[in-house]
Image: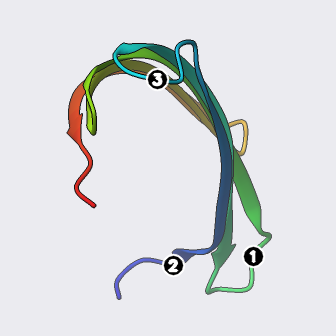
Amino acid sequence: MNSDTFINGITGLGLTKYLKPEGPGFFVFGGVGLAVMQEFTGGEDDSGFGLIGGIGYDISKHCSIQGDIIYTNYAGEWQSVGVRVTVNFLAF
């Protein structure tokens, strides 16, 4: 409520390639995202984008570990690079 900006649009697209489709094995993935910021005060819209890439390993069915590198850039004003490691469990 005290800010003069908000996100009015965010979208992304990613792709994962399993090197061994059945059973435990490695996979690689990547993606791209876009966000659009609009000022309440009637200023110009700004936009930013992000990239992600990484590698993972299926430990067992529905369980994996992965490492990511994430890059973001907002309106050319700032950018960041992050590293993330996660353990994932998919329940369905």
Q: Which residue is mark 2?
A: 4
- Rendered position, 50 above or below 44: above
Q: Quadrant of the N terminus?
A: bottom left
The residue tagged with tag 1: helix, strand or loop? loop
Identity of the residue drawn at 51% across and 78% down: 4
Spot occupied by residue 7 in the image (x, y as percentages of width and height)? 57, 72
How many numbered callouts? 3
Which residue type does callout 3 highlight? Glu
In the image, 20: left or right of 62? right
In the image, 87: left or right of 76? left
Using a 10 Å C-alpha cutoff, classify the residue at mark 3 as few (fewer than 14 neighbours), some (14 to 19) or many (20 or more): few
In the image, 25: left or right of 49? left
- CB of mark 3 within 8 Å of CB of mark 2? no
Q: Which residue is mark 3?
A: 22
Identity of the residue drawn at 73% across and 55% down: 47
Spot occupied by residue 36 in the image (x, y as percentages of width and height)? 70, 64
